[in-house]
Amino acid sequence: MSPDGRRLCWLAPSENDQPYAIKTYDLKADRTEELGIQWPGEEDITWGDCGWADGDTLVVWGYSVSSAVQWRRDTPKALHILRVNYKDRTVQREGSSRRFAKWRISPDCRYAFASGPEDGAQPGVHFLDLRTGRTQYIGGEERPAWTADARVALRISRFYGQEQWLCRFDVEKAAETPVLKIREDEELVAASPRGRFAILCDRTRGSLRPLSLVNVATGQRQRLPGSVLSSISLVWRHASVLGPWVSTFTPDGRKFMLWSPTPRQLFGLQLYSIPEGWLK
């Protein structure tokens, strides 16, 4: 959905020789529209999905692998992005020619974290500015959690004698600051739209992984009832598929939903609220 809440967009099968058709739906006007664009000529790109970078710009992203290898989930792949102007249909192409096995793209598709480079050099996490092509090795936890405006990401890194910290990563400076010391057995699941709150997962109980809500500024914690099975499948290779279901915050950051399967309700969604005292 567009940031103003007015339009939806999605990829649909094309009726001509184009890879896909980009469809939009205007909720206010009750109108569906197809955006005709000039797609890249390469046939080896697998286009995945589309979304809104802002009220006037759609983004379509996909991946390609080396012609010498077979596509698998962990195969290093190059990222391709089409930035489409909704009004005049002009297309700007961005992305990275360097292939990585795992990608985590920002909501506006301007930045990305990636790991598992094809050349095997520095196998940890890299930060990429997709507008300029700049790539920087940063190490640390693989799975970041982006804020809604994509200016900041929360992620886990080691500081001060290899202690595990929840860190705030500034994309403009390409640098991170430790903000909260956490336990060795915890991993990051999600962040609120402005990064004030985080959801952490306890890995000590095998597949039964309870979740906790954390106030990043104060360190206050609250166990989320009924969420003991929420993150059974939450690993990087599923993050792009399960991410929206695992945690979705309201735009004001006061409420969020979790996919919380139980033996009786496999696909149950639960609604939680941020404690009132934390919102001051």
Image (cartoon, helix red, strand yellow):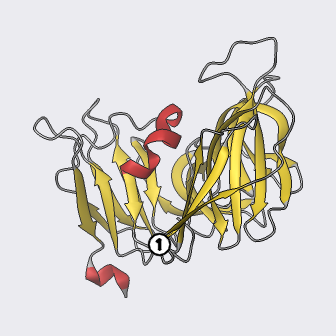
135 shown above or below 232: below
20 shown above or below 57: above
46 shown above or below 229: above
Q: Residue shown at 45%/47% (left/top)?
A: 243
Residue nearest the viewer, comparing 200 with 95: 95
Q: Residue furthest left?
A: 264
Residue 162 in sight here? yes
**With 130 as the anchor, is 164 left or right in this view?**
left
**With 80 as the anchor, is 54 left or right in this view?**
left
Counting from the top left corner in percent of width and height, residue 45 is at 76, 31
Instruction: Name the residue type under label 1.
Output: Arg
Residue nearest the viewer, comparing 116 with 167: 116
Task: Give the residue pinned by disc 1.
Answer: 196
Counting from the top left corner in percent of width and height, residue 22 is at 65, 51
**With 163 as the anchor, is 184 left or right in this view?**
left
Residue 161 in sight here? no
Residue nearest the viewer, comparing 96 with 91: 91
Q: Residue furthest front?
A: 15
Q: Residue shown at 76%/48% (left/top)?
A: 81
**With 26 as the anchor, is 75 left or right in this view?**
right
Quarter of the image with the C terminus in it: bottom left
Image mark count: 1
The image quarter containing residue 203 is: top left
Secondary structure beneath dot 1 equals: loop
96 shown above or below 121: below
Q: Residue shown at 10%/38% (left/top)?
A: 264
Counting from the top left corner in percent of width and height, residue 222 is at 26, 63
Crowding at mark 1 (Cα within 10 Å: few <14, some 14-19, many 20+):
some
Counting from the top left corner in percent of width and height, residue 35 is at 70, 57
